[in-house]
Amino acid sequence: SHSMSGDPASARADDSETTASCASEDYDMYPNIDDLLPDPASMRASGAQDATDFFRDVWGDTPISWRVPPNTLRSLREGFRNGDVAELVSRDCRDESNDVYDDDDVAEMLDRTKPPLRHTLSLPFCYAPGAHALRNSVLRMAYNAPTLAEDACDYDAKEVRDFVADDAEEKKNAVAHRGREKSSSAKTRLRFANDVDVGVYASPEGGVEASWHYDANHNVTVQLYGTKTWHVSPGRRGGDRNVNQSRGHRDAHRNGREAGDVLYEHLGKTFTLTPGDAIYVPPGTWHRVVPKSAERPDGPDDEDEDGKNKKNVGGGVANRVCLSVDVRVANVPRARWTCESVFHFMFTRGAVFGERSHSSPYLSDATVKQPKPRASMDSTTELGDGAAGRGGVVTQRLANLEAVRYLSNDSSSDPFWYPPRLAPYQPEMSEGADLRAELGFLADAFEGKEKWREENTRAGKFHKDATLAWHPMVAAEVDRSGDSEDSEGPPCVLRLRAVSGLTNMEYARMSIVVPKCVHVSCKVLVGLNGAFPDDEPEANAEKKKKPTLSAVFPQLFSDDDEEYVKHAAQDLLDVLTWCRYLRLTSPASPARGAKRQKRGAD
């Protein structure tokens, strides 16, 4: 276990709101994602020609199948309750609202797997010990995936004009940028990974199949019990590798893009998965899954004195099961994130209609009191909606210009934001999808921490006068239990949530248990996105100023604070900036407007 960063007593957090349902588990004994992935020979044997690295050569591109080692299969089975479906459902699985299944739910679900229905149980949110190990290993990869120079979105108006210039060569280069330099780590593909989940799928003998469909996520599936046949269409010619939503082949087209979907069933491949076989299916790849045989799981017998199964008389998955485990990583198309970023900038930071109703303490009283202009499609200036007392109207032209201004890097308030970075968690502190980790755990898991500090210090971003900005999509909340000034008191919890107001997609759901000595800093950070507590007095003269690093993290620059307090503050700053919740700007950086004027003069 990890001690909490900055806690002089090195005590574990005691959070009464969290049920430590799996505190006694040793998750290192179960396979992680690296244990499941194929070696180069297996990749090439399955059709990935010249493949040497799974993430570089297969991820997002080629459906393949391979076998995992026997000891990996054995450990996986143990991590998923040895195939005891009733125990998995009742102890480890949640519904999409993160609620547990009660006894009636479990009984009904098991009954549906019996004849004549023979339903397949789809349980996409599993938190069994083996599921925690797999999920956390992917999250660790994403957490430590290096950033790339190509991720910079710093460009000027001339570059924008050149990009859209009516020039054949320019357009050719703009369609698909092909750089010559390659990252040393293929796991950089996971630097923007989103929505990592682990699920289990349990079918009876001859259970209902999953008809042709494609998913908007990467799928790594391992067969634990029984046999399934996977039919997979050609990855590049069938579905859409940039898919944004899952759909079934028989589903009605929801839009013009889906109307262009084509299923080349006759050109597909067939993979038969027996226990120990694995398959990878990229996003947008058509596939059909047919349960074939089932087998008796390894779990404890539940028989009466006559040797009859009490739990599942009449068959079903509690008696014999075809069981697989699925690791999923959501696919985030660039187009979707562009729209997400524009949407949340315009509604929270945009000069046209975002800031006027923004209750940040860094805006003047006069600005905050201005009525928010009408920005809906039913507004019109010709009917008088544009009256000054009503706040004015945002026309479509004005909204479009605001979006262009932001995407053209012409925004004086905020540059482009990427999605928050995923992070590992501590299962013993978490409750289903509500993931939680101590600050010290996250600091220890950050492999490039020292390098990150050096880079930011050298760039002036850790200077005391550096200014701070909070991710416009992320809501932050701090547990205010125990507001005493005692820096050695009980820890508090910084809750971070990012659910898109545009697509309802969840991009972040994480709680960080932080020591009491940085509680005040957490409260100030919450205020950066306009959520200061009502009882927090602020001087009017200070409202227009952007917050500085020394104002939010005074512990870093004070000679009065003890070393453990400084370490806790630095750890929190490292984690929040690395995970893209918080952005720092060096005081030496030119104003964005000045930067554009200089470029224009050149």
Image (spheres, grey):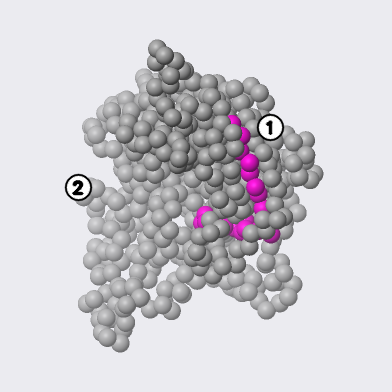
Q: Is residue 131 left or right of residue 236?
A: left
| Residue 59 vs residue 151, the one in the foreground | 59
**Residue at horizontal 29%, vertical 64%?**
357
Query: Is disc 2 surrounded by few (<14), some (14 to 19) or many (20+) residues within 10 Å?
Result: few
Label 2 sits on a secondary structure element that is loop
Examine the image and state in which quarter residue 296 appears. top right
Q: Point out the frontmost of discs 1 and 2.
A: 1
Residue range corresponding to the magenta coloring:
226-247
**Residue at horizontal 34%, vertical 72%?**
375
Q: Is residue 241 magenta?
A: yes
Q: Is residue 88 magenta?
A: no
The alpha-carbon separation of the residues under discs 1 and 2 comes to 60 Å
Q: Position of residue 374 (x, y in %)?
A: 30, 73
Residue at which label 1 appears = 67
Is residue 229 something that shows in the picture? yes
Q: Position of residue 598 (x, y in %)?
A: 57, 69
| Residue 201 vs residue 96, the one in the foreground | 201
| Residue 176 vs residue 148, the one in the foreground | 176
